[in-house]
Image (spheres, grey):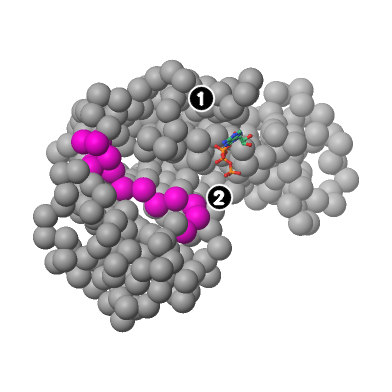
Amino acid sequence: MSAVIQNNPKPLLAAHGLVKHFGSTRVVDGVDLQCRSGEILGMLGANGAGKTTTLRLCYGFLQPDEGSVFIDGVERQKDPDGVNRQIGVCTQDDTFDTDFTVRDNLLWFGHYFRPRPTDLESRVKELLDRFDLTRYAKAKPDTLSGGYRRRLMIARALVHQPKVLFLDEPTTGLDPQARMAVWELVDGLRNEGLGIVLTTHYMDEAERLSDNLLVLKEGQVVSVGAPRTVLGDLVGEHVVVLDAKIPQAEMIESWLDKEGFSEPTRILNTWQFALDGAGLARFSAAFGQLRFEVRPPNLDDLFLQLTDDDS
Ligand SMILES: Nc1ncnc2c1ncn2[C@@H]1O[C@H](COP(=O)(O)OP(=O)(O)OP(=O)(O)O)[C@@H](O)[C@H]1O
């Protein structure tokens, strides 16, 4: 936990009991979440779990059917302009004004806020420098690479110096170098005390960046907390890895079933399944003659489990 979080125990973002229907489907189903200053909350879930919809409810693009969102203690519905002034949003898709230059996209975006940010010119200059965009200041956004367009989207979300930043899949489609550059920028923003909520499909991104994880399934929070806690909750304490060709496969499957553990997952030439500490001891006693590896769970295990459950 960072020093900033300890000094700022009140959440910058707090959502309570969010519900959203599309037609008869309850896409977001009673979601509570919090994010503090200097903290990144990573939102995970399989396709269609409700991540983007939850994010949109938090940043006000959608109205919840039930529930409320507070930014720095102010309820969105009571003061939408005030709340908008405190949040920055970077959507999945680029939404620039393609007729404007990079610099003017930043500048004009700042004019939309009330009260209008002061000294916009110098703020834009600072952001251009910080996001390594100065050399493209007079270019049109469409001429930039994917990585630099993302930088511009994030820079634009920060023009008015918000306290909370929402990032919806910030690095999807970027090459590894560009992804790492975005991670560095996001990490720097966290260290300055922003509260950041991000959705991602990349487990390495969630693992590297998130202080806390929130896992959604069918619109409900199935686990929330520090990554280790969430993994322990949803995957288990240990992952056993076996050669996929072992002759005892059926015996192991029925043992797992009898003991109430999840089915094994086949990954290339291995077979993997999660056990708690006591389960591992019983497994070792029952199959002591087998050769197997034991490793800690990771977010890929979590993601496979979430998507397996859906299929
Ligand atoms: N505007 C809409 N109208 C109708 N249904 C919608 C709308 N937006 C989202 N949905 C549906 O709501 C469900 C949740 O969608 P959402 O985009 O929030 O999930 P997600 O977890 O972000 O998924 P992904 O990882 O694929 O982006 C999906 O079944 C989706 O089809």
Determine which residue is flagged by label 2. Answer: 201
Q: Which residues are magenta?
A: 81-94
Q: Quadrant of the N terminus?
A: top left
Q: Which residue is painted at 14% across and 38% down in the image?
A: 7
Left or right: where 137 falls relative to 249: left
Task: Say whether residue 245 is magenta.
Answer: no
**Which residue is at the front of the view, 72 or 96?**
96
Vertical arrangement, residue 134 with respect to residue 71, above or below: below
Q: Is mark 2 within 8 Å of ligand 1?
A: yes
Q: Is residue 51 visible from the viewing direction of this image? A: yes
Query: Residue 2 at x, y = what percent?
Result: 24, 46
The kind of residue tagged 1 is Lys
Q: Which residue is painted at 46% across and 76% down in the image?
A: 143
Vertical arrangement, residue 300 with respect to residue 72, above or below: below
Left or right: where 119 falls relative to 60: left
Which label sits on residue 231? none
Determine which residue is flagged by label 1. Answer: 20
| Whole-number angstrom distance, CA of label 2 to CA of label 1 | 22 Å
Query: Residue 104 at x, y = what percent?
Result: 29, 67
Q: Circle 2: is it few (<14), some (14-19), or many (20+) Cα within 10 Å? A: some
Q: Name the element at disc 1.
A: strand
**Which residue is at the front of the view, 103 or 72?**
103
Q: Quadrant of the C terminus?
A: top right
Q: Quadrant of residue 63?
A: top left
